[in-house]
């Protein structure tokens, strides 16, 4: 088994965790819409350089317009929800909730991909969702807008992933990438006018750093999936909880409480079980979680699946 991919993935997710730390710092001073708008603007040149290498003939009209529209809406909601959640919640708690994304992908694969989910994966989903409840502790702690944002991010991120799995082979890479970016640019630009705050040069540099880190993390994740099997690379996403614990404690004075630790452990084990179950084949015809091959939350980073498919 080639473990080089695991090494590249660990670095990639370390970069993504740093990316989220910068979001948290800036989120204390600026509205999510403003951060998403400028990070999207700075990402345009980087993503465009990659899209220019796409030699597939065609135009920018989607083959599946309604699925593309739904995915664009999900990606837009995902961005602002992720930025807000990282701004107001402890890092480890956000990651614990976002780690439920593979569980939601498994559920959504049933109606969208017509995937057959056996009793083992159903059990993993149920156990994982119990883990989410352990993290949220309904009735004992306040359920805030930040928690709602993190849950929304997990759900719309899972939906966007499933849609890419459904239409990705027929849609051009540029179509899959450009519409969400344009949507973020236009909609967040409009929302930004409601709460815009002037930015100093160092803060503009911080947003530029978000874009660069998201881009570098995506490139390393592509390299990881090219080097090793998905079953080796995918579990590395859970290393982000380690970075979140370290960064949260050192930079923000956050401590991981026992319910978050227990709930995150349950969610991670459930997600790992689904990944390894799909890797073994069996009844999974689509392996939706294993083939997502993108970060659970793509707040400002690009989805790597279309590029991996083109490189094959």
Image (cartoon, grey):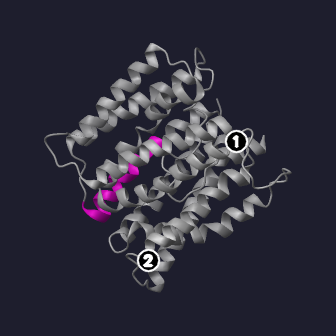
Label tally: 2
Decide whether the magenta segment is chiefly helix, strand or loop: helix
Q: Say whether residue 128 is left or right of residue 209.
A: left
The stretch of residues the image draws in magenta is 237-253
Q: Quadrant of the C terminus?
A: top right
Of all residues, the one furthest to the front in this rendering is: 66
Residue 41 place in picture, x, y as percent: 59, 71
The reply to whether residue 228 is in sight is no
Tell me the residue that label 2 is attached to.
193
Identify the residue at horizontal 26%, vertical 40% (top origin): 135
Task: Name the foreground residue: 54 vs 24.
Answer: 54
Give the Cα distance between marks 2 and 1.
42 Å
Identify the residue at horizontal 61%, vertical 18% (top origin): 281
Q: Quadrant of residue 60?
A: bottom right
The dot on residue 226 is 1
Residue 301 place in picture, x, y as percent: 56, 57
Identify the residue at horizontal 40%, vertical 62% (top origin): 21
Comes first in the chain, label 2 or label 1 = 2
Which secondary structure lies at badge 2?
Answer: loop
Within-10-Å neighbours for mark 1: few <14, some 14–19, many 20+: some
The reply to whether residue 2 is in sight is yes
Given contact means CB atoms under 8 Å apart, are the residues at marks 2 and 1 in contact?
Answer: no
Q: Quadrant of residue 25?
A: bottom left
Q: Quadrant of the N terminus?
A: top right
Which secondary structure lies at badge 1?
Answer: helix
Q: Quadrant of residue 96?
A: top left
Task: Name the foreground residue: 265 vs 185.
Answer: 185
Residue 40 place in picture, x, y as percent: 56, 66
The dot on residue 210 is none
């Amino acid at each position: 088994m080639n473990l080089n991919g695991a090494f590249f993935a660990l670095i990639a997710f370390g970069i993504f965790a740093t990316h989220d730390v910068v979001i948290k710092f800036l989120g204390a001073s600026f509205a999510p819409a403003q951060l998403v708008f400028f990070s999207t603007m700075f990402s345009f040149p980087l993503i465009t350089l990659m899209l220019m290498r796409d030699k597939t003939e065609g135009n920018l009209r989607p083959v599946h317009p309604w699925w593309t529209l739904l995915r664009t809406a999900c990606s837009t909601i995902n961005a602002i929800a992720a930025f807000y959640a990282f701004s107001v919640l402890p890092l480890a708690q956000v990651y614990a909730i976002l780690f439920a994304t593979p569980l939601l992908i498994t559920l959504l694969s049933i109606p969208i991909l017509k995937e057959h989910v056996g009793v083992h994966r159903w059990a993993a989903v149920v156990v994982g969702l119990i883990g989410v409840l352990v993290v949220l502790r309904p009735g004992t702690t306040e359920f805030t807008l930040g928690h709602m944002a993190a849950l929304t991010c997990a759900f719309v991120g899972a939906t966007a992933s499933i849609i890419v799995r459904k239409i990705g082979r027929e849609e051009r890479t540029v179509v899959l990438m450009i519409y969400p970016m344009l949507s973020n640019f236009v909609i967040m630009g409009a929302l930004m006018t409601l709460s815009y705050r002037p930015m100093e040069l160092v803060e503009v540099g911080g947003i530029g750093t978000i874009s660069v880190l998201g881009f570098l993390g995506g490139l390393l994740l592509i390299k990881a999936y090219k080097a090793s099997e998905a079953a080796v690379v995918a579990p590395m996403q859970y290393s982000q909880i380690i970075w979140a614990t370290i960064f949260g404690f050192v930079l923000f004075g956050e401590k991981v409480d026992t319910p978050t630790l227990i709930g995150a452990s349950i969610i991670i084990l459930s997600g790992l079980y689904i990944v390894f179950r799909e890797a073994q084949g069996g009844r999974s015809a689509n392996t939706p979680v294993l083939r997502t091959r993108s970060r659970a939350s793509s707040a400002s980073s690009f989805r790597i699946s279309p590029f991996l498919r083109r490189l094959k």
